[in-house]
Image (cartoon, helix red, strand yellow):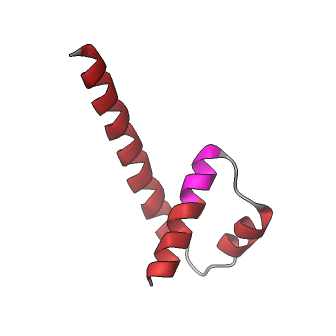
Amino acid sequence: MLRHLWQVLSSTIAAFFGVQTNKNRLRDFQTSSPIPFIVMGVIVAMVFVAGLLLIVNQVLA
């Protein structure tokens, strides 16, 4: 379970930066459900935005 979670997280982060390998992309598209990738994408996006807000608030304070 933890290994699968790590694969989904690493694939999501790689997709955010556009550096996903073809081997990993093929592995990801062979999974039965896209739901883990969608949920992880939303979580990563929220963490990214929260991080940006934190940095901006620190710079402007």
Quadrant of the frame with the N terminus: bottom left
Can residue 49 be seen in this snapshot?
yes
Q: Residue furthest left?
A: 61
- Residue at the (50%, 63%) spot, across then down: 9
Q: Position of residue 45 (x, y in %)?
A: 43, 46
The magenta stretch spans which residues?
12-17
Q: Main secondary structure of the magenta part?
A: helix
Vertical arrangement, residue 26 with respect to residue 10, above or below: below
Q: Quadrant of residue 14?
A: bottom right
- Residue at the (75%, 60%) spot, across then down: 21
Vertical arrangement, residue 48 with respect to residue 44, above or below: above
Q: Position of residue 46 (x, y in %)?
A: 36, 46
- Residue at the (68%, 71%) spot, across then down: 29
Locate residue 19 relative to residue 41 in the image: left or right.
Answer: right
Q: Nearer the viewer, residue 28 or 23?
A: 23
Locate residue 55 relative to residue 15 in the image: left or right.
Answer: left
Q: Nearer the viewer, residue 11 or 41?
A: 11
Q: Position of residue 19 (x, y in %)?
A: 70, 50
Quadrant of the frame with the C terminus: top left
